[in-house]
Image: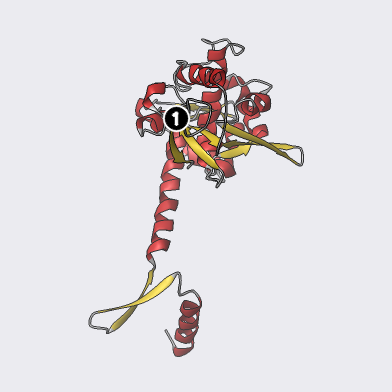
């Protein structure tokens, strides 16, 4: 490297000293450029996101066009069809590349984010294995009837979205409603930012038996989801994924009507 290039490089490194650091090796005979620790952590997080994306693809099935609609939300590759063709042992494109099918099924990957939350203790064990992580405003107050109904819904058994085709529960029943929430919970958990436009889920309506009233369904369960509308576009958010100063996650009911009186609390993550 000539002197001009060295000066330019030195100027660049000084400008971005928070990202790069200079080290010396071989008894200071050689100068090395390294990334600082936090940048290495960011790069590792990016590599993990790519691995997570591949894992998501390995348990996906449905319309290829619909999956591509979630390209940005799920960090899918731009050449989605080309990516799938590189793994013929896992995926098959059919219907003129409009449908993607699983060639093989790996049961070990069919674990929902909600199930992992239960295993990690992010829900109160007394609510059982079918509870969602729930969030409430600080100083939330409710009567005993509210908590009884909330407990009833949280403890209601339901099948995994990966196991149930959607025909076993009437969507108008409480168990059918909870199954639909579990499907949306898993779909949103598979996105990078834990949020997505509800319009992008329309392509999965037939495969996942999603209802026409998805916005009203999610909005009726504000402890688990948040639905916003901007410029005629409805966005669904997974509540537990967003940390807010005025919100806490309650792992179980707060008896006595005042949030926090007896319930275990943790910051919403």
Number of marks drawn = 1
In the image shown, does 150 or 121 lie closer to the viewer? Answer: 150
In the image shown, does 61 or 83 lie closer to the viewer? Answer: 61
Mark 1 lies on residue: 114
Q: How many neighbours does mark 1 have within 10 angstroms: few (below 14), some (14-19), or many (20 or more)?
A: many
Q: In the current view of this chain or complex, which residue is farthest to the right?
A: 231
Q: 99 left or right of 124?
A: right
Q: Residue 116 in the image: state x and y as whole percent.
A: 39, 32
Q: Residue 111 in the image: state x and y as whole percent.
A: 40, 28
Where 141 falls versus 30 (above or below)?
Answer: above
**Which residue is located at x 35 percent, y 28 percent?**
108
Where 27 falls versus 43 (above or below)?
Answer: below
Q: Residue 145 in the image: state x and y as whole percent.
A: 56, 17
Question: Does residue 115 appear in the picture of this structure?
Answer: yes
Using the rendered view, name the quadrant where residue 64 is placed.
Answer: top right
**Which residue is located at x 42 percent, y 52 percent?**
45
Quadrant occupied by the N terminus: bottom left
Q: Residue 125 in the image: state x and y as whole percent.
A: 37, 25
Q: In the current view of this chain or complex, which residue is farthest to the bottom?
A: 3
Question: Does residue 190 appear in the picture of this structure?
Answer: no
Q: 128 left or right of 96?
A: left
Q: Secondary structure at mark 1?
A: helix
């Amino acid at each position: 490297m000539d002197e001009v290039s060295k000066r330019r490089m030195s100027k660049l490194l000084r400008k971005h000293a928070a990202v790069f650091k200079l080290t010396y090796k071989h008894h200071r005979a050689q100068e090395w450029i390294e990334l600082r620790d936090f940048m290495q952590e960011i790069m590792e997080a990016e590599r993990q996101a790519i691995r997570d994306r591949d894992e998501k693809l390995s348990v996906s099935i449905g319309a290829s066009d619909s999956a591509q609609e979630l390209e940005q939300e799920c960090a899918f590759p731009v050449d989605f069809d080309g990516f799938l063709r590189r793994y013929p042992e896992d995926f098959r494109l059919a219907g003129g590349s409009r449908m993607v099918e699983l060639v093989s099924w790996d049961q070990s990957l069919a674990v929902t984010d909600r199930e992992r939350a239960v295993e990690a203790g992010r829900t109160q064990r007394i609510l059982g294995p079918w509870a969602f992580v729930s969030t409430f405003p600080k100083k939330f107050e409710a009567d005993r009837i509210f908590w009884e109904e909330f407990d009833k819904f949280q403890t209601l058994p339901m099948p995994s979205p990966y196991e149930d085709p959607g025909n076993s529960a009437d969507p108008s029943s409480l168990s059918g409603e909870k199954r639909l929430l579990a499907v949306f919970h898993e779909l949103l958990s598979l996105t990078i930012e834990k949020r997505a436009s509800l319009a992008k889920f329309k392509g999965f309506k037939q495969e996942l038996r999603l209802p026409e009233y998805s916005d009203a369904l999610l909005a009726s369960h504000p402890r688990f989801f948040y639905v916003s509308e901007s410029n005629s576009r409805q966005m669904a958010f997974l509540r537990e994924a967003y940390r807010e100063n005025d919100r806490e996650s309650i792992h179980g009911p707060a008896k006595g009507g005042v949030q926090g009186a007896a319930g275990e609390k943790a910051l919403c993550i």
